Image (tube, helix red, strand yellow):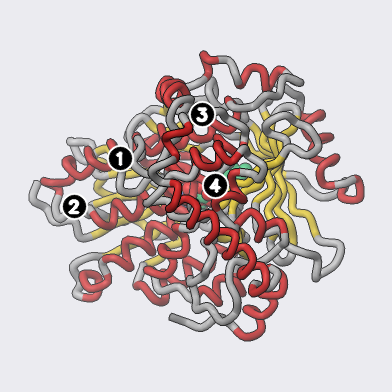
Amino acid sequence: MNKPVKAVVIVGGGTAGWLTAGIIAARHQARMKAGGLSITLVESPDIRAIGVGEGTWPTMRSTLERMGVSETALFRECDAAFKQGAKFVGWTSGAPDDAYYHPLMVPQGFSRVNLVPHWLHAGGAVSFCDFVTPQGRLCDAGLAPKTIAHGEYRAPANYAYHLDAGKFGVFLGRHCREKLGVRHVLADVESVRQSETGDIESLITRQAGQIDGDLFVDCTGFSALLLGKTLGVGFRECGDILFCDTALAVQVPYDSPDAPLASQTISTAHEAGWTWDICLPTRRGIGYAYSSRHTSEEAARETLLRYIGPQHKDLPVRKIPIHAGHRETFWKNNCVAVGLASGFLEPLESSAIVLVELSAKLLAEQLPACREVMDLVAKRFNETTMYRWGRIIDFLKLHYVLTRRTDTEFWRDNCDPATVPERLRELLTLWRYQSPWFYDEFDRLEEVFPAASYQYVLYGMGFKTEVAAEETVDTAATALRCVQDNEKMIGELSMRLPTNRELLNKIHQYGLQPI
Ligand SMILES: Cc1cc2nc3c(=O)[nH]c(=O)nc-3n(C[C@H](O)[C@H](O)[C@H](O)COP(=O)(O)OP(=O)(O)OC[C@H]3O[C@@H](n4cnc5c(N)ncnc54)[C@H](O)[C@@H]3O)c2cc1C
């Protein structure tokens, strides 16, 4: 039981595997260099990583910075672009002008004052987003979140990345091997040797023989080879809450190499689901996530084609199943699952990769010193991770349950109270009288979606919170200053910032200042 944890073995070389390897290795470099810890990543040479997952969350900046990754190299090698949020089109009423933003900047003065009551009392002449942050306006104008003069990872406007998932995995792998000392084994895991207690002792691979370890991380994607197949941990479905169960993905070229680049993911609602539209410098990644219970594949393909345009009718379309749900537990014995092996939900808010980052960070911070304490660490990891999955499900469902669309069964079914998680139903009742804010329910150190995200979706979709006029009196002066600061910032940034395309071209040519 006192066996020290010295050998971490990660199976899977997709985004989850390499991010996990990099995050743990960066956190424990000194131990690795002293020979007290080794990290081995085993990856099948034949089973390809999923190769989708192009929208990230701003956490990726600090994750990569901590790993010592050059941001310039990321832009150059991963076909990366800026992401400043998501624009939701057609989700509320389906009318032609129906759109709102979920930007990545929190509202001005967010920790000091809740601007929701002030916005409500101002009468809603401007959108909630424009009232509290400049970011929607920057997106509308196609502007970048920074200039070439800002150092790597620094910016006046918060941002994440859109990137080529296939290139990103390769890029991370090289960095982990060359800079962080991660050992890479290209081999297929064919069987798993377990002790009497159920702990995994070693992997038997086709090409590299036996690989021993003290802690195993299952990053094998949908196959969940270690936690699911070997340790028998079940899967908790949530297709009764989130209906989309199939995705059709396509890569669409631009008409010209200098076509403007949106720096927001565009999520457009359709009759039985929604399309994502992600602009990379050299192409767009587009996909239709839909419910096969509410439409046929043929109709879904037509919807996708209508969105991308008939000139693209011959592009190859990939069909990917979405099995909505997560494992019943995430860490069992000496095996922890990260990434698709732990579960998956429709990619409406790019929640998968951020959860990989948070899980890997938790694992790196709490890395058990020996087998004796592993179950205690596992218990905490499982509690936190279960909480996070629950909150992500709530947050994704929020986008559906606030709709006023009744045009198809898909939208009508989504509003059936029986499909809404209880916690979300309670919060929606509470928020009719008080808006979510800094000190609300969201009390964990690292919430996947903070209260600001809920504000943007709720008030972007026209949710009504009844706030008494006198509630705004005490904070009126602070709120006014925040609103004025916001207007000033909109003016200043609009003048100063280049377009996305201009800045990306400059980064490719000159690079950003390393920090
Ligand atoms: C349609 C779609 C769109 C998505 N969009 C987004 C998005 O915009 N944002 C976001 O955050 N996430 C998104 N995701 C999720 C995202 O793609 C994944 O979370 C991410 O790519 C991590 O995948 P993974 O590494 O867990 O699995 P995979 O990429 O599937 O990697 C699995 C790895 O395991 C290895 N492997 C499997 N079996 C064996 C074996 N027997 N022996 C050795 N190796 C093995 C494979 O070789 C591979 O390297 C999307 C997912 C889908 C399906």
Q: Nearer the viewer, mark 3 or mark 1?
A: 3
Residue at position x 66%, y 57% in the image: 137
Q: Is residue 381 left or right of residue 228?
A: left
Q: Nearer the viewer, mark 3 or mark 4?
A: 3
Q: Secondary structure at mark 2?
A: loop
Q: Is residue 258 left or right of residue 220?
A: right
Kindly identify the amino acid type of the residue bearing the numbered disc 2. Pro
Kindly identify the amino acid type of the residue bearing the numbered disc 3. Thr
Quarter that holds the C terminus? bottom left
Q: Nearer the viewer, mark 4 or mark 2?
A: 4
| Dot 3 crowding, Cα within 10 Å, few <14, some 14–19, many 20+ | many
| Dot 4 crowding, Cα within 10 Å, few <14, some 14–19, many 20+ | some
The residue to which callout 2 is attached is 368
Where is residue 220? Give x, y as percent: 45, 47
Q: Is mark 2 in CB contact (under 8 Å) with mark 3?
A: no
Kindly identify the amino acid type of the residue bearing the numbered disc 4. Ser
The residue to which callout 1 is attached is 384
Disc 3 from disc 1: Cα separation: 30 Å
Disc 2 from disc 1: Cα separation: 16 Å
Q: Secondary structure at mark 1?
A: helix
Residue at position x 66%, y 43% in the image: 100
> Does label 2 or label 3 sit earlier along the sequence?
2
Kindly identify the amino acid type of the residue bearing the numbered disc 1. Thr
Disc 3 from disc 4: Cα separation: 27 Å
Report whether residue 49 is seen. no
Q: Is residue 84 left or right of residue 200?
A: right
Q: Where is 29 relative to 345, above or below?
A: below
Where is residue 124? Give x, y as percent: 63, 39
The residue to which callout 4 is attached is 350
Quarter of the rendering containing residue 492: bottom right
The residue to which callout 3 is attached is 465
